[in-house]
Image (cartoon, helix red, strand yellow):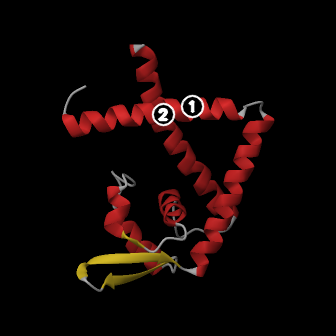
Amino acid sequence: MKEQYLDLTKLIERLHRRFLDVLRTELNRLGIKEINGVQALLLANIGDEDIIIRDLVERGYYQGSNVSYNIKKLVDFGYLEQERVEHDRRSVRVKLTDKARDLVAHIRDLEVRNAEALADEGLEETDIRGAFKTLRRLERTWADYVQYGSF
């Protein structure tokens, strides 16, 4: 079990990097050069929400990347609108522009194409459900460790 666990943790990291590569390739295909895969993923995760930046971080997204820098770049390039929150001027709320919504629509189409490619390769919905269940258990185990300091 130990060896499989270690292999799984390495695979998770590689898969995340590979997914960012997929996003970067799609951006290149669309002729979008000003943003990177992490920023495109950030836009996709914001989606239709009008969200406070702090909430993105608290959801567990983007640890290890500089959220403020990425938000600034996305605002500068016209993908995000931002405004200070009325009741807490320290907080900033962001939402997608039409330009970003168009890009997110392309990303959603890419996700559909990827799902279809997996199905064409013989992967079944039960396989995906099993993988998802395993990864959620792993996430819960790690979250418990972080919160309580031991297993």
Q: How would you rate the neighbour count of disc 2 (Cα within 10 Å): few for under 14, some for 14-19, many for 20 or more?
A: some
Residue placed most toward the observer, 120 or 65: 120
The image shows residue 70, relative to residue 99, as above or below, that is above
- Tell me which amino acid carries mark 1: Ala
Residue hosting label 1: 131
Are the residues flagged by discs 1 and 2 in contact, CB closer than 8 Å? yes
Picture coordinates of residue 101, whole percent (x, y): 60, 73
Residue drawn at point x = 54 percent, y = 71 percent: 48
- Tell me which amino acid carries mark 2: Leu
Residue hosting label 2: 135
The image shows residue 56, relative to residue 51, as above or below, that is above
In the rendered image, which quarter contains the C terminus? Answer: top left
Residue 68 visible from this viewpoint: no
Residue drawn at point x = 63 percent, y = 69 percent: 103
Q: Secondary structure at mark 1?
A: helix
Q: Residue furthest right?
A: 120
Picture coordinates of residue 86, whole percent (x, y): 29, 86
Q: Secondary structure at mark 2?
A: helix
Residue 143 visible from this viewpoint: yes
